[in-house]
Amino acid sequence: MGKAGKRWWLFKSEPEEFSFGDLLKAPRKRTFWNGVRNYQARNLLRDEVQVGDLVLYYHSNAQPSGVAGIAEVVGAASADPTQFESGDYHEPRATKDAPVWFGVEVAAVKALPRLVALEELKASAALAQMGVVRKGNRLSVQPLTQAEFDEVVRMAARKV
DNA sequence: GCCAACGTTGGC
DNA sequence: GCCAACGTTGGC
């Protein structure tokens, strides 16, 4: 932990659950990124994602799926409160002293001028290594290179 | 709704 | 520790 320098990430969210538009409408355009229940994604949130990092906000299970906006990490990892509540996100093994699941606070930076669909991401040679275009990659928190992040932003600025 | 890909669980 | 069964993700 305690890395130097900004990093770049892609966070997936189903827009029916919480879209980028919902984030823009949220108080102070912020939300706590909760509900991650995958250990690899949790480890990234807990150990790697830092305040100041930039996030591509990806809509999954959407028509079409793709990158909708840019967000920024504004709060360091803390226990996901939903693990202590009853319901789908409850985690019986979690205690306040030893939480199992973590989240970070994110804030909307801006919507992209247009959604960059998964189909376009797949068609870009520059993005061939990006996790989301690779078959079977279901991680909801994925690291990006700065070049990948910048390329998606550039694509969004171009007409289709 | 289908199903491929992957993660998790649990019997042994 | 192996691995089959099961559950989930997410594109299509």
Image (tube, coloured by chain):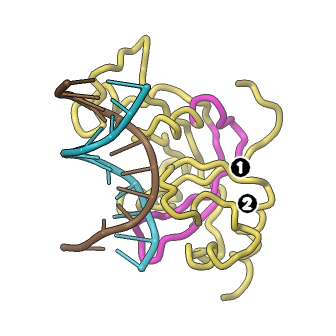
Chain colours: A yellow, B brown, C cyan
Q: Position of residue A20 (x, y in %)?
A: 51, 61
Q: Which residues are magenta?
A: A45-74
Q: Taking B7 as reference, is A100 above or below it?
A: above
Residue at image location 43% in from the left, 11% down from the top: A97
Q: Which residue is mark 1?
A: A8
Residue at image location 65% in from the left, 37% down from the top: A49
Q: Position of residue A123 (x, y in %)?
A: 65, 79
Q: Position of residue A36 (x, y in %)?
A: 43, 41
Cα separation between marks 1 and 2 = 7 Å
Q: Amino acid at mark 2?
A: Phe
Q: Is residue A68 magenta?
A: yes
**Outermost bottom residue:** A160
Q: Which residue is mark 2?
A: A149
Q: Which mark is residue A51?
A: none
Quarter of the figure that contains the N terminus of chain A: top right
Which element is circle 1 on? Answer: strand
Q: Is residue A37 left or right of residue A4?
A: left
Q: Is residue A96 magenta?
A: no
Q: Residues within 10 Å of mark 2 (few under 14, many from 20)?
A: many
